[in-house]
Amino acid sequence: MTRKEMKKQAKAALRNFYGAKMLLVIFSILGMGYGTASSVVRNFTGNTTEASGNLGFGSINIDALLVFGVLLIVFSLLVAVAVLSLVIFLQILVVGGQWKYLEIFRGGPENDEKPAFSSIAKAYKDGTWPKVYAFLIVEGLILIGLTIVPIVGWIFLIYFALGWSQAVYVLHDQLEDGSYAGPLGVLRASSALMRGYRWNYFVFLLSFILWDLLVGVTFGLASFWVSPYTIMTRAIYYHQRLNGKF
């Protein structure tokens, strides 16, 4: 199956009830994710560190300064935990939207109906959210860890990221059929599925570059159409790859 055919299928899957389907991935459209959280936390902690470094020592009692420093650190940690918790909560909803797109495509046009926005909370409703949470944390920590190793780490980062590109959908199917064996099991299954197809998927992602440029020149407004289209096409890529269509 060609990229052109998958994109055609994505457009067909989104044709009916587009507004409701767009809302399923609204958090992806708004750019919610780990990158946003990391930026917020880095900026906050960086600013507080800079502020504490600019304090004058000449007229401030050392004990008062120590107490203030401890309180500042505690407050910074609490803010960081709160921000990260909120982002992970939202990221699980993002995953729910991706899952729903896969289910919409698999349901076929004959079963196409207006999806409920609440369906993105599937993991919270059926109690599988701790497994989704664990998966997001493990995958995120590994990938973030690779970013701090120059050159070699970045090469492995790209390699693993492409191999794990289908992990969200693998997680969905494993939870559905009862074969879930932990975050690492999900990542291994995704890597196995993408063995020999990493370059193929990379080219697949590059095929959306003009759409990405459109999002940029419209200051993100085009993402309300582009994001559902690209997310649905990625779900279709997984389904067709899983079924050996290419």
Image (cartoon, grey):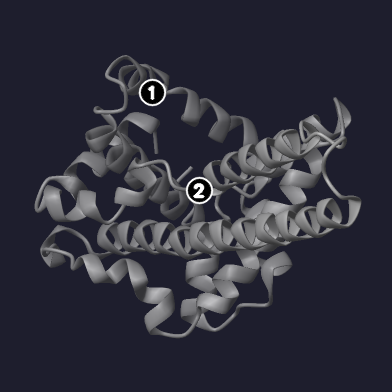
| Residue 218 sits above or below residue 205 on the image | above
Pointer 2: what residue? 33
Task: Give residue 234's position: percent from left, percent from top.
Answer: 42, 44
Mark 2, Cα crowd under 10 Å, few <14 / some 14-19 / many 20+, is: some
Amino acid of disc 1 = Asp
| Distance Cα–Cα, label 2 vs label 1 | 18 Å
The residue that appears at 48% across and 30% down in the rendered structure is 205
| Residue 218 sits above or below residue 61 on the image | above
Residue toward you, 143 or 106 = 143
Is residue 222 visible to us here?
A: yes
Task: Give residue 39's position: percent from left, percent from top.
Answer: 59, 39
Asked if the residues shown at circle 2 and circle 1 are in contact, with their CB atoms under 8 angstroms apart, the answer is no
Q: Earlier in the sequence, mark 2 or mark 1?
A: 2
The reply, left or right, for residue 164 in relation to residue 88 is right
Helix, strand or loop for disc 2: loop
Task: Give residue 216's position: percent from left, percent from top.
Answer: 36, 19
Res. 115 image quadrant: bottom left
Task: Give residue 117's position: percent from left, percent from top.
Answer: 22, 65
Please identify, in this view, whether the residue under mark 2 or under mark 1 is nearer the observer. Answer: 2
The residue that appears at 22% across and 35% down in the rendered structure is 225
Amino acid of disc 2 = Gly
The residue that appears at 69% across and 44% down in the rendered structure is 45
The residue that appears at 28% across and 70% down in the rendered structure is 119
Is residue 187 visible to us here?
A: no
The reply, left or right, for residue 5 in relation to residue 142 is left
Pointer 1: what residue? 212
The quadrant of the image that shows the N terminus is top left
Mark 1, Cα crowd under 10 Å, few <14 / some 14-19 / many 20+, is: some
